[in-house]
Image: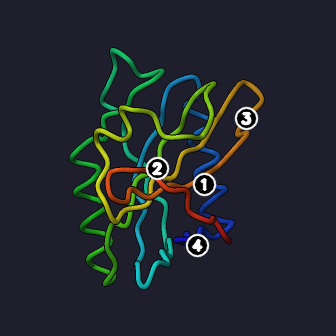
Amino acid sequence: MATLHLPPAEQARLRAWAEKGYPQETCGVLIGRSRDGVTEVVEVFPARNLNQERARDRYFLDPQDYLKADESARARGLSIVGVWHSHPDHPARPSATDRAHAWEGWSYVIASVGPEGLTELRSWRLKDGVFEEEVVNP
């Protein structure tokens, strides 16, 4: 089983953005490194959700924010290793839309958020067209 190391400080940043953006979906990228089934996140990078028509249940990560994150990662010898987004009032499980836009080899962190705040944080990895859950460790 793949493992995602997501430091507590980065988990806290992700939580804050997901809660602040509620009831809209929030999104961003994960910057770090991957090797031998282990992904180490160094930074959780926010991005704007450009999907304004269905912002409660869809996201479209701003390409300009993606490029900024990629430049930041490369300058530090890192890379983009995944994407994070929130699921307002829904479980932290990938949707059919998430699957349709996913890339193999990346981690997909989903934060379930409701009026009471973050309720669940899980990570998924696409393998042979199917999402498999990753273990999330600090």
Real-space Cα separation, disc 4 to disc 1, in angstroms: 15 Å
Tag 4's secondary structure? strand
Q: CA distance from mark 2 to mark 1?
A: 12 Å
Is there a contact, CB below 8 Å, between mark 4 and mark 2?
no
Dot 4 and dot 1 residues touching (CB under 8 Å): no
Note whether 90 is above or below 38 in the view shown.
above
- Lower sequence index among marks 2 and 1: 1
- Label 2 or label 3, whichever lies nearer to me, is 2
> The C terminus appears in which quarter of the rendering?
bottom right
Q: List the residue tagged with mark 3.
A: 117
Q: Position of residue 36 (x, y in %)?
A: 43, 85
Helix, strand or loop status at disc 2:
strand
Q: Which residue is mark 4?
A: 5
Above or below — where is 78 with respect to 18? below
Q: Amino acid at mark 1?
A: Arg
Asked if 10 appears above or below 54 in the picture, the reply is below
| Relative image position of residue 28 (x, y in whole percent) | 41, 49
Read off the residue under disc 2. Answer: 84
* Picture layout, residue 59 above or below residue 99: above
What type is the residue that disc 3 sits on? Gly
Q: Quadrant of residue 104?
A: bottom left
Query: In the rendering, at what x and y percent does residue 39 appear?
Result: 48, 74
Q: Which residue is mark 1?
A: 13
Judge from the rendering whether residue 115 lies leftward or rightward of residue 98; answer left or right: right
